[in-house]
Amino acid sequence: MPHLHIDYCGTLDAHSDMQQLCARLARTLVQMEDDGGHAIFPLNGTRVLAYPAPHHAVADGAPDKVFVYLNLRITAGRSAALVERVGRTLLAQVDAHFAPLSGKLPVRVTLHIDEGHPIYEGKWASA
């Protein structure tokens, strides 16, 4: 952990490099440190995955609006202030990524951070 899943309108691919956003957010997560200078998240456990939605509807029916939904799953044990700092930092990176679209394409972004204890966690690796 952490695992960051991004769902977004597939039409956004014509306007933005989502692979670049994934790399930027992964780098951000592994570079974050707590107040003691220790990494908040492990390098090997950090994942950022983006999924374009080929079919979507925005509730107000506006066809030109696009959405980006980010859901960060983390294990419990970090302070609320630290989790909030992670959220603000990620949103700042998302804002910087989509800044070139400002005034051209209405992008709506939501970030949720969920934490919890897994009921089961199995791991396997080939190397």
Image (cartoon, rainbow, N blue to C red):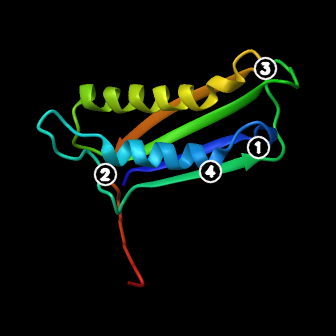
State the separation of the CA atoms marked 1 and 3: 14 Å
Check contact, mark 1 vs mark 3: CB within 8 A. no
Q: Earlier in the sequence, mark 2 or mark 1?
A: 1
Q: Which residue is drawn at the image coordinates 67% and 50% (left, top)?
A: 51
**Does residue 105 appear left or right of residue 93 in this picture?**
right
Q: Earlier in the sequence, mark 4 or mark 2?
A: 4
Three-letter residue code for mark 4: Gln
In this figure, which residue is indicated by the disc labeled 3?
104
In this figure, which residue is indicated by the disc labeled 4?
19
Task: Check disc 3 and report its element: helix, strand or loop.
Answer: loop
Three-letter residue code for mark 2: His
Task: Check disc 2 and report its element: helix, strand or loop.
Answer: loop
* Location of residue 30 in the rendering, given as x and y in whole percent from the top left corner: 34, 48
In this figure, which residue is indicated by the disc labeled 2?
117
> Tag 2: Cα neighbours inside 10 Å, few (<14), some, or many (≥20)?
few
Check contact, mark 2 vs mark 1: CB within 8 A. no
Q: Where, quadrant-wise, is the N terminus in this rendering?
A: bottom left
Task: Check disc 1 and report its element: helix, strand or loop.
Answer: helix
Residue furthest toward the front?
Answer: 100
State the separation of the CA atoms marked 1 and 4: 10 Å
Task: Check disc 4 and report its element: helix, strand or loop.
Answer: helix
Three-letter residue code for mark 3: Lys
